[in-house]
Amino acid sequence: MSHPPQPDPLSGREVDAGAVFVLESKGQWWHAGFHLTTAIVGPTILTLPYAFRGLGWGVGFMCLTVMGVVTFYSYCLMSKVLDHCEKAGRRHIRFRELAADVLGSGWMFYFVIFIQTAINTGVSIGAILLAGECLQIMYSNISPDGSLKLYEFIAMVTAAMIFLSQLPSFHSLRHINMVSLLLSLGYTFLVVGACIRAGLSKNAPRRDYSLESSESARVFSAFTSISVLAAIFGNGILPEIQATLAPPATGKMFKGLLMCYSVILVTFYSAAVSGYWVFGNQSNSNILKSLMPDEGPSLAPIWVLGLAIIFVLLQLFAIGLVYSQVAYEIMEKQSADVNQGMFSKRNLVPRLILRTIYMIFCGFMAAMLPFFGDINGVVGAIGFIPLDFILPMLLYNMTYKPPKSSLTYWVNISIIVVFTGVGLMGAFSSLRKLVLDANKFKLFSSDVVD
């Protein structure tokens, strides 16, 4: 069986500018922790009450915990596979090359790159869209009768992203991603405090935690919510993050994951509980919108919500940059000359042009298709579930070949089977909701559809 061309990172990296420039391996374990936290702990936290809305308290807690445990386990397994390959002289720095090597399949190389590119581009588009929405929210409070539309704010964000996208390597984002981690803690605490205050105030909304009236609607809503949770925990670039670590990477990624999941433990549960406690089955896909209803007074001090929005806005730039790195390394693998310097005119001009074009594309799509809530579920089911809940277990079983009588083998097989079913049902449910909401969609709308 023929294999796709795969440069050996240990012996042939000098011919691969995408590896040498974008995925340069200089980082420490805490840098990986910053990258991982930015990749997972983002403003999607604010959708957790919305996910609970389709599950209820008990199932919501169970699914949130299971997703956390399974993804942590999954990422640890993938890191072990990467370590195993490195010790065998095959240090993989790209998800697609790892999958193709371990599974020995040319089509797997293209399957992973297709899914990964779709996820990363989707996240970049979503980051620009939400950042534009943050600017719009601030503008509408300062100037309620202002004439600026959502697409104009998206254009402003895109311009800023074009400038920031010229940071040459993933490693060069380490300080930005450290700030991103602090921002995620900041806006989570602000939102949790605002929710508690709203729940105890005289204007507190009526709490109703009932689910959909019909059984079929409850099932579809539940699987849509599970898909949203998968998207929230998803991280389709773990091999690329591990690539930024100075070799040998053995053990460093586990420390980075511990840092990341410590932040997840603090932020995810507090946001989910406080938001769903206050708003119940009326929770919006962005809890900030629930705290700032169209009708009636704001349920929290404007300065608190304004500061939270500013923190979210700033972190979205970091998220957009992190998830763009796969696109950049693909582009520079083909366009850059590794024999000339990273900042030589020969490499600087193509980088400037290609990254600008990529960001303009993402900005245009964000302005044209402002349908964040429904698309988030589809991306989770079709993208993140295969990459984060299925492939790592398969890669581990293929690499380490645990005995079929062992607990590890059957845990991995069980996760693969369960999440394959969850992914299929989630994809169907999310696409169904997308179709049902189609009448709300309007190209270049000035309102983000939940």
Image (cartoon, rainbow, N blue to C red):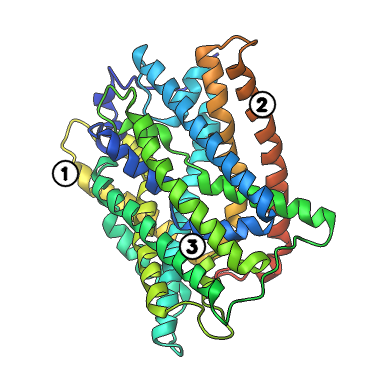
Going from the N terminus, do you reach mark 2 or mark 3 first? 3
Q: The N terminus is located in which quarter?
A: top right
* Label 3 sits on residue: 366
Q: Residues within 10 Å of mark 1 (few under 14, many from 20)?
A: few
> Label 2's element?
helix
Please say whether residue 285 is visible from this viewpoint. Answer: no
Question: Residue 218 at what x, y percent from top left?
Answer: 77, 55
Dots 2 and 3: beta carbons under 8 Å? no
Q: Say the numbered circle drawn on residue 343.
A: 1
Question: Residue 52 at what x, y percent from top left?
Answer: 63, 56
Q: Residue at horizontal 25%, vertical 36%?
A: 21
Q: Residue at horizontal 43%, vertical 22%?
A: 80
Question: Residue 134 at what x, y percent from top left?
Answer: 43, 70
Instruction: Give the quadrant of residue 369.
Output: bottom right
Instruction: Give the quadrant of residue 6.
Output: top left
Tell me the mark number nearer the camera, choosing from 1 and 2: 2
Residue type beneath disc 1: Phe
* Label 2 sits on residue: 414
Going from the N terminus, do you reach mark 1 or mark 3 first? 1
Q: Foreground: 164 or 52?
A: 52
Q: Residue at horizontal 56%, vertical 58%?
A: 273
Image position of 370 with respect to 340: above or below: below
> Label 1's element?
loop
Please say whether residue 424 is visible from this viewpoint. Answer: yes
Q: Foreground: 69 or 390?
A: 69
> Spatial distance from mark 1 to mark 3, Cα to Cα?
30 Å
Residue type beneath disc 2: Ser
> Spatial distance from mark 1 to mark 2, Cα to Cα?
49 Å
> Spatial distance from mark 2 to mark 3, Cα to Cα?
37 Å
Tell me the mark number nearer the camera, choosing from 2 and 3: 2
